[in-house]
Image: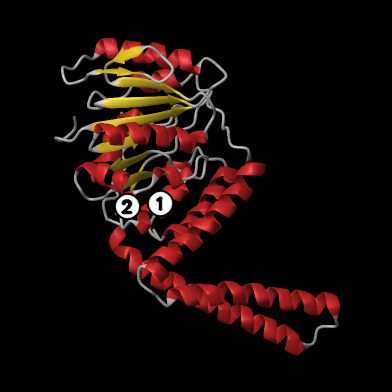
Amino acid sequence: MYKGKTIGVVVPAYNEGKLVGDVIRTLPEFVDRAFVVDDCSTDGTWREIREAARDANDRVTRPDQEKLHADGGQPVSGRVVPIRHEQNRGVGGAIKTGYRRARDEGLDVTAVVNGDGQMDPEILDRIIDPVVDGDADYAKGNRLSRDEHCEQMSAWRLFGNVLLTFLTKVVSGYWRMSDPQNGYTAISSRALSAIDLDDLHDDYGFCNDLLVALNVRGMRVTDVEMAAKYGDEESHIKYRRFVPRLSRLLARRALWRFKVKYVVTDFHPLVLLYALGVIGIGGGVLYGGWSVVAATPTPLDALLALLTVLLSSLCLTLAMIFDRIDNAPLETDATEQFHELE
């Protein structure tokens, strides 16, 4: 328990047999329940999870913790609950499994700490504080707030993160948010009960998708400064599949958010501005390209194409400004100053 609130942690793990045990063993003592989800790993992850869970449960015994039956394993008594998927569901699917267990147990705040060792358990209190204190319904780490925080990021990883940050701002409506791929998060029981977990993406776009769902439900979100941490872990992201899938997901979820928030619930003219902007830019680019390929372009053709793109860009910019203003109350000022722990 932490500041009078019950705290749960979801630890998704896939082929992290060398790292997940240390994550489990270093979880802070204030964590009431940890749901460690092995997403059908092919190495020794499940064995390591059960051994670390046994060690942790033997070390900490609490009278309010009943016996729980771990999926796919033996009954476990204590705060660490091993869960094993019989089929691989993706990192989002693993988090959703843990979220359901946390929701069923009525935990006040549920954090996510990945099993790859990239998320320092020693700063878990910083991540959950905005939610525990009632300043936000969802808090997430942000490695992009200062240059020194992302020193360990490769140039390619940093570029991709910055690009995804902009796209997710547009799609989710959280315009002050950064680093949407950061999975070090905390969510309130209120927010967890309000969203439909079954509708959320099962793979690496889960964090982006969750932000869209939270926005539609009117949940407050905040960033918490943290430094990037990389070690011996290996990324399981296959970029040839990840980029097209995430692009389709973001486009689909943007249309869903605009429809629900600005058409079905309450009409807002920014929908028309977004439509005019996207259609106009696409039309201007196609007209300019057609003029070059199909005929000899004249100065008038070039001017018409340029004006169409410029006016459409203005419509798109105005739509974004309206969207940012409309969603400003959903982003709090609880961003914390990060200090290195000695």
Can you name the residue that lies furthest to the bottom here?
300
Indicate left or right for 135 with 115 as reference: left
Q: Position of residue 224 (x, y in %)?
A: 33, 45
For the point 58% across and 71% down, the residue is 278
Q: Eyeballing the image, is 306 above or below 119?
A: below
For the point 34% across and 64% down, the residue is 327
Indicate left or right for 253 with 109 as reference: right
Which mark is drawn over residue 211? 1
Q: Which residue is mark 2?
A: 221
Q: Eyeballing the image, is 116 above or below 286?
A: above
The quadrant in which the N terminus is found is: top left
Q: Nearer the viewer, residue 98 or 184?
A: 98
Precedes in sequence: disc 1 or disc 2: 1
Q: Amino acid at mark 1?
A: Leu
Q: Amino acid at mark 2?
A: Val
For residue 2, what is the image quadrant? top left
User: Do the residues under discs 1 and 2 have CB atoms within 8 angstroms?
Assistant: yes
Indicate the secondary structure of the residue bearing disc 2.
strand
